[in-house]
Amino acid sequence: HSPVDPSAEPPEKAEEAALRPGVLAEFGGQQRVAEQLGLVLAASKSRGTTPDHVLLSGPPGLGKTTLAMIIASEMSAPIRISSGPAIQHAGDLAAILSSLVPGEVFFLDEIHRMSKPAEEMLYLAMEDFRVDVVVGKGPGATAIPIDIPPFTLVGATTRAGLLPGPLRDRFGFTAQLDYYEVADLERIVTRSAGVIGVELAAGTAHTIASRSRGTPRIANRLLRRVRDWADVNHESPVTPQGAQTALDLYEVDPLGLDRLDRAVLTAVCLKFGGGPVGLSTLAISVGEEPQTVEEVAEPFLVRLGFLMRTPRGRVATDRAWRHLGLEPPSDGPS
Ligand code: ADP
């Protein structure tokens, strides 16, 4: 073994970049979205124009950043990456927009967390490729219009519903990413194993995929933990039993529930008798922001049929109780 070079990039960082599919054809899953986006890109390529602005919504780790990078690479355009919370002043946004090169892709993550003045500047930029920079204060303030080159905004948000209508309306193409099917994740795990050089026996990709919470980012992470286990235990190819042992060690739930998912379920069942419980009460009891509970944990629990959102609050289903190894209350919802 060579000594560790402390100046080198963390190996997992470099690997992360290698795992990102670079072209649309390598992007597994989300078939409809990939097809629709492919059409948008092909059409603008054939017309020689900059593609319409794209809004991608969905829980973290499903491939929004990856798609933005794919759009740039398919259009042979550079990409600029920023995020809503990083743009607190309209001036921050003006600085980025006015330095874009023609055709550049501007990826704006967490677009729903931008400040109001920046958002208003973005409206104009998206529509007219112009920003008004205000110089001075009070009655003497003047707005100086600055033309900006045509660009493609790729906005990402955990929930499209959080965006004000006028902003949402300015996107020409909107796509909602959903949790991946196990079969899609299986293909992603197989591809990733090839990239990072892990040999998997038949069925192992399936074992990892089915515990990945419908999320490619988690699938890649679990694959690395399985690799750690296999390296230490000299198992190659890695068998499904091996992968299962490794994942049990990391306390990965058989259905892929993570710490927050389990905390939310446990709280609804044990602290609130199965619900209904309001979002903010629930969030406080698990020590998280309501937004995180609502946008990260809940969509997956609802999808699994563990949690219901009712007008009176969140309710755990019988399946949820049983998953926690508990007997559901006899009068509870099923
Ligand atoms: P988001 O921006 O939605 O949080 P990312 O685009 O950063 O998600 O994706 C997380 C990781 O998952 C990336 O490193 C990428 O390698 C992987 N990934 C996401 N979507 C796919 C996909 N469709 N096929 C293969 N890998 C994917």
Image (cartoon, rainbow, N blue to C red):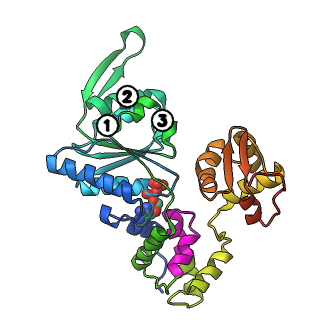
- Check disc 1 and report its element: helix, strand or loop: helix
Asked if labels 1 and 2 touch by Cβ distance under 8 angstroms, the answer is yes
Give the magenta range.
204-225
In the rendered view, would you say 293 is above or below 12?
above
- Magenta: predominant secondary structure element? helix
Q: Is residue 176 left or right of residue 244?
A: left
Mark 3 vs mark 2: give the one in front. Answer: 3
Mark yes or no: residue 37 visible: yes
Quarter of the image containing the C terminus? bottom right
Q: How far separated are the C-alphas under marks 3 and 2?
A: 15 Å
Type of amino acid under label 3: Leu
If you read the primary sequence from the N terminus, does the residue marked by circle 3 or circle 2 appear first?
A: 2
Assess disc 3: are there few (<14), some (14-19) or many (≥20) residues with their C-alpha within 10 Å of its C-alpha. Answer: some
Tell me the crowding category of disc 2: few under 14, some 14 to 19, or many 20 or more residues within 10 angstroms, Cα based: some
The residue where tag 1 is placed is: 97
Residue type for callout 2: Met
> Which residue: 48% across, 81% down?
3
Q: Is residue 82 left or right of residue 40?
A: right
Query: Disc 3 on helix, strand or loop?
Result: loop
Per the image, the residue denoted by label 3 is: 163
**Percent from the top left, x then y, of residue 287?**
73, 48
Residue 70, percent across and down? 32, 57
Which residue occupies 53% across, 63% down?
214
Is residue 219 one of those drawn in magenta? Answer: yes
Residue 27, horizontal then vertical, whole percent? 37, 64
Residue at which label 2 appears: 121
Mark 1–mark 3 Cα distance, whole angstroms, equals: 20 Å
